[in-house]
Image (cartoon, rainbow, N blue to C red):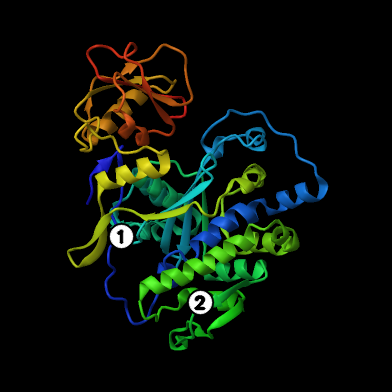
Amino acid sequence: MGEKMNGKQRRPVRRTERTAPKKRGFNPFKVFFKIVISIVLAFVMLAGGACFAYYKITGNTPFADDGVISNNASETSLLDALLKRNIKLNVAVFGVDKDGTRTDVIFVVHYDSATEGISLVSIPRDTRISLADEVKANITAEGRSYNQVTKINAVHAYSGEKMGCQNAVLQIEDLLGIKIDHYVKVDLEAFRAIVDAIGGVDMYVPQDMYWDMRDTGDPLINLKEGQQHLDGDKAEQLVRFRHYSNGDVDRIEVQQLFLNALAEKVLSTETILKNLPDFISVMYKYIETDVSLSDALKYVNYIDKLDMSKISMETLPGVGQYVGKISYFIYDPEETREMVDRVFYSVDPVTSDDGTQTDSKALLIEVANGGSINGLAAQYSKKLENSGYRVASPTNYSGQQNTYTRIQVKNEGVGSDLVSFFTDAKVEVAPNEVDDDVDIRIILGTKEK
């Protein structure tokens, strides 16, 4: 298994070749990109659709609550959103299997309004993890059992319907060291309903597609080459078809063509207004999410700050490997950390003059408690120590409190590898504020818990 980072299991591994599929079952949720973009769009559009339509039709805007300006979407006030102040939003997307037990698709969607881009990070369902302490406590409180070391898709199953998504989110936060603002859980029925809610999608089907899966309880795929209007059932056939001359290369290309067409239609104001009742129906009937009405009122303001040309996708770094007789995806903690820094914190790897990658592990770090939670500096000192950093004794900071964590360094070019350990952190070059006997001082912000 990988090392612990930030007191948490961290950074997964690169995409691994799957073992040969069982005859019974091609699981539709393993299809690359299949439902994910549509759910991201559903999250933005369905959650905010009613509010957006209200604005368009009446021209009125609700009064905003006062609030603290924050890069974290869940802490952004409606006033900030109306003024379109920059936010960063992390959404966990879960695609469940047929019986709704395991999360066979797991994505984290990162939206940055400053860049207007969306990044999708795929977490392989077989990722080998050790259950986070809070997850174990929640499962035990429900009177359920679990295996300490397991695949990440089993967390939802261990937790049951009531705590499934909550615990899956906690495990992802533990794995990546990031804050998840919301979750969205869908199944194939939701995918079909989303397509039907927008009135279907027009696209050119590149070849005849025929695959009879009815003996396994799955649909008959029977599409003809040419320009077609795809409703929910036909869209499912398209994204599930896999018999191409170039295998997965062709399959992914077709799926991307479809999802681009879907994205363009969903992002159309005309589509929202015309299909608003269906959107609302789909949202409440088929999609489980913790996005509230107040959240929707905030996020809908960023609809025009979403550039569909700026969508990127990555898979957690790692390799497929058998442990005993069980096939796992073993993530690489260091490579995952680099990926998370880059994707979620826009931090480029720190390099030395000779071009080799460096970090702050050779430097002595002091963690100072800049908030009001007793023992927090010691807690974070231990987390950094567990991840291989040199840490001095924790201290208290008596200066002005800040919501964000300040990583004070003496020289430019270090400290960025520490950002991902905190909820909201910034690197500051402040040689006069760092004591001579340490190299880096970290002043914890009030957001840290």
What is the residue that sits farthest to the right in this orientation? Answer: 58
Which residue is depicted at the point 74% across and 34% down?
Answer: 63
Q: Is residue 394 above or below residue 243?
A: above
Q: Is residue 138 above or below residue 20?
A: above
Give the amino acid at mark 2. Leu
Marks 1/2: CA distance?
24 Å
Q: Residues within 10 Å of mark 2 (few under 14, many from 20)?
A: many
Q: Is residue 202 left or right of residue 438?
A: right
Which residue is depicted at the point 41% across and 55% down?
Answer: 313
Residue at label 2? 238
Query: Can you give x and y, in whole percent of width and height, for residue 367 in the image?
Result: 31, 22
Query: Can you give x and y, in whole percent of width and height, for residue 52 in the image?
Result: 71, 50
Q: Is residue 184 left or right of residue 368?
A: right
Query: Can you give x and y, in whole percent of width and height, for residue 215 in the image?
Result: 44, 88
Which residue is depicted at the point 50% across and 84% down?
Answer: 221
What is the residue that sits farthest to the front in this orientation? Answer: 354
Residue at label 1? 15
What is the residue that sits farthest to the left in this orientation? Answer: 324
Which residue is depicted at the point 64% across and 52% down?
Answer: 47
Q: Is residue 120 above or below residue 274?
A: above
Give the amino acid at mark 1. Arg
Q: Would residue 416 be visible to someone looking at this image?
A: yes
Q: Secondary structure at mark 2?
A: helix
Q: Is residue 448 left or right of residue 146?
A: right
Query: Can you give x and y, in whole percent of width and height, for residue 9 in the image?
Result: 30, 45
Q: Secondary structure at mark 1?
A: loop
| Quadrant occupied by the C terminus | top left
Whichever of labels 1 and 2 marks the residue nearer the N terminus, that label is 1
Q: Residues within 10 Å of mark 1 (few under 14, many from 20)?
A: some
Q: How many marks?
A: 2
Q: Would residue 98 be visible to someone looking at this image?
A: no
Q: Nearer the viewer, residue 445 or 419?
A: 419
